[in-house]
Image (cartoon, rainbow, N blue to C red):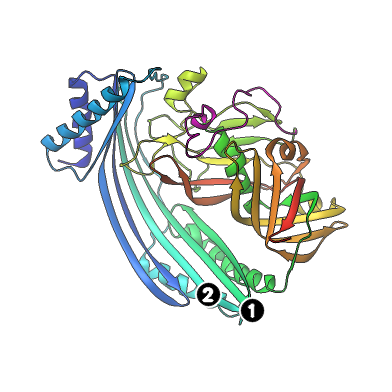
Amino acid sequence: MLLEDFADKAVQLALQNGIQYCDVRAETIESNGFLLEDGQIEHFSSKFEAGLGIRILADGAWGFYSISNPKSIDELKDGVISAIKCALYYAQTKKKKVKMAETHVCVDTVDYGMIETPTVDEMTKLALECDGIIRVRKRIKKSSIHMHHDVFDKYFVNSEGAKITQRHNDTISHLSVTAHESGLSETVSTTEGGRGGMEMITKEDNILKKAYSISEKADKLIDAKPAKEEKTTVVMNPDFVALLTHEILGHPSEADRVLGKEMAWAGGAWWSGKIGTKIGSTELNVIDDPMMQSSLGWYKYDDEGVIASRKSLVKDGVLVGHMQSRETASLFDAEPNSAMRAAGYSFMPLIRMACTCICPGDWDPDELIKDVKSGYLICDMKVPSIDMMRYNWNISCQYAQKIENGECKELLRDVIVMGNAPEFFNSIDARGKYLTVRPITNCGKGDPMQIMRMGNGGPHIRGIATVKSVGT
C-alpha cells in the first residue's frame, strides 16, 4: 500500500471506532546537504523519512500516534487504537472538552514548484566559492557554510472529507565567519534561502554578495568600539526587525500562548484579553501571511486542512487578532485562520507563525536616518532574550553604527538593544517603504520541542530603546 492509502485507511478505522474526529498526515521528507568548514568538507548528509501522524478527537480530548514506514494494516490498527485510548484516558480528567470551529472542507493538490533543481555538486561548488570570498582577509580565522536542499511531500486527510496533497522544496544556506586578533573575536553570520530551488540562494549572486559582506563586517568589527549605554532613537534594519517581530509580536499572537497553554515551558502573552486595546503607535501594523511566495512560511493549507489566509494582528497600533487553530477559534468565537503546523509527521500540530511582518510605511530608509539628530542604526539579528510574557526584551545585533546629524558614523560592536513591549511599540514613529522577509529556520516551541521554519520581516523602523554593549 502507498502511504496515502494507509492514511485513508486510518481515518476509516477511526470512524469505525466511533470517534468525534480524526485527521492523518502522511509525509515524506528527503534532505541532502553538507557542512564546509575552512575550505574543507566536514561531512555530507542524506536523510529520508516517511510516516503517518494520526490525530484523534474522542470524548472531547486529543490523542495522537505516529508510525514510521507503516507496513501492515494490523500495525495501522494498533496505532489508531492507541491514539483513541490516549484520547479517552485524557478525557477522564479534562474539565473543558475540546470543540472545533467549522471550516471549509477542501480537496486539492498543490505543487509549489521551483526554477532550478539543486544538486549537491552545484551547492558544493557554490560553497567553495563563498569560502574563498570569506577567507581572503587575514584576520578571518574561521569560515563555516552549511547548505541543504529538502523535499517535502504531505498528504492530509480527515474524517470530514478533506484530502489535500502539498509538495514543496526548501533550499537553505547558513554562512558564518569569525575574525580574531589580539584576544578579540567577532562573528557575523547570515541565513539565506527559501521555498524553492537553487534560485533561492543564487538569484542576483545573493549568496556571493552575502559572503563578501559578512567577511568584511567581521574584519571591521575587530577595530570597532563598544557603545555607551543610553536610551535614544534607534533605526532598526529589516533583518533585525525580523527577529524583533518574531519574538515580541509573533509569539505572543499565538492563541495557545494567549490562553496560557504554553506557560509551563515557553511563556504566555502580556496582551492576553486585550483585543481591541491600543498597544502601540499608529505606525504599528502587523500581519501574518502564509501566502508570501518563496518565504519559508509559504503554504496554501495548514496542518488542519484550513485554507491559508492573511491575518491582521495589529492595526494602527490596536491589537485586533491572534493566530488561531480550529480549537482555539471556538474559544475566541473567531474563525480558524490557518495557523496550525507540525514540524513533521511524528508531532502534533501547534499554532505557529507563517510569515509575520511589520507592514511597510512611506519613508525612504535614507531619509529616515537623515531625520535623526542622534541615535543608532541597529543591524542584523543575533541573540534574543525575552521574558515569559514577551514584555521585557533585549536582543543583540551583529553590528551598529552611531547616527549623528543624520549621518552614519563609526561602527560599533557587541551591541544589545533593550526595551519593554508597550513602551517601544508606542515610540515607533516611522517605517521604511521596503518590506524584506528573512528566513527563520530554528524556531522552537512545544513539549516535546518542535523546530519550525518560517518567514519574518518588515521594513526599517524607528523608535526609542536603550542601547549598550556587552560589559558596559
Circle 2: residue type: Lys
109 vs 435, left or right, is left
Which dot, 1 or 2, sits closer to the camera? Answer: 1
Residue 217 x/y as whole percent: 65, 69
Residue 421 x/y as whole percent: 68, 38
461 vs 389, left or right, is right
Tell me what residue is drawn at x 64 percent, y 38 percent: 391
Is residue 302 found inside the magenta-colored segment of the image?
no
66, 301: nearer the viewer: 66
Quarter of the image with the C terminus is bottom right
Q: Main secondary structure of the magenta part?
A: loop
Mark with earlier residue (1, 2): 2
Instruction: State whether residue 466 is above or below residue 306.
Output: below
374, 119: nearer the viewer: 374
Quarter of the image with the N terminus is top left
* Residue furthest bottom in the image: 138
Q: Which residues are magenta?
A: 255-281
Q: Quadrant of residue 182?
A: bottom right
The answer, for residue 130, to whether it is visible in the render is no
Tell me what residue is drawn at x 64 percent, y 57 percent: 380
Identify the residue under disc 1. Answer: 181
36, 444: nearer the viewer: 444
Which numbered circle lies on residue 142?
A: 2
Is residue 279 found inside the magenta-colored segment of the image?
yes
Look at the numbered disc 2 and give the secondary structure of its residue.
Answer: strand
Instruction: State whether residue 110 is above or below residue 406.
Output: above
Instruction: State whether residue 197 is above or below residue 248.
Output: below
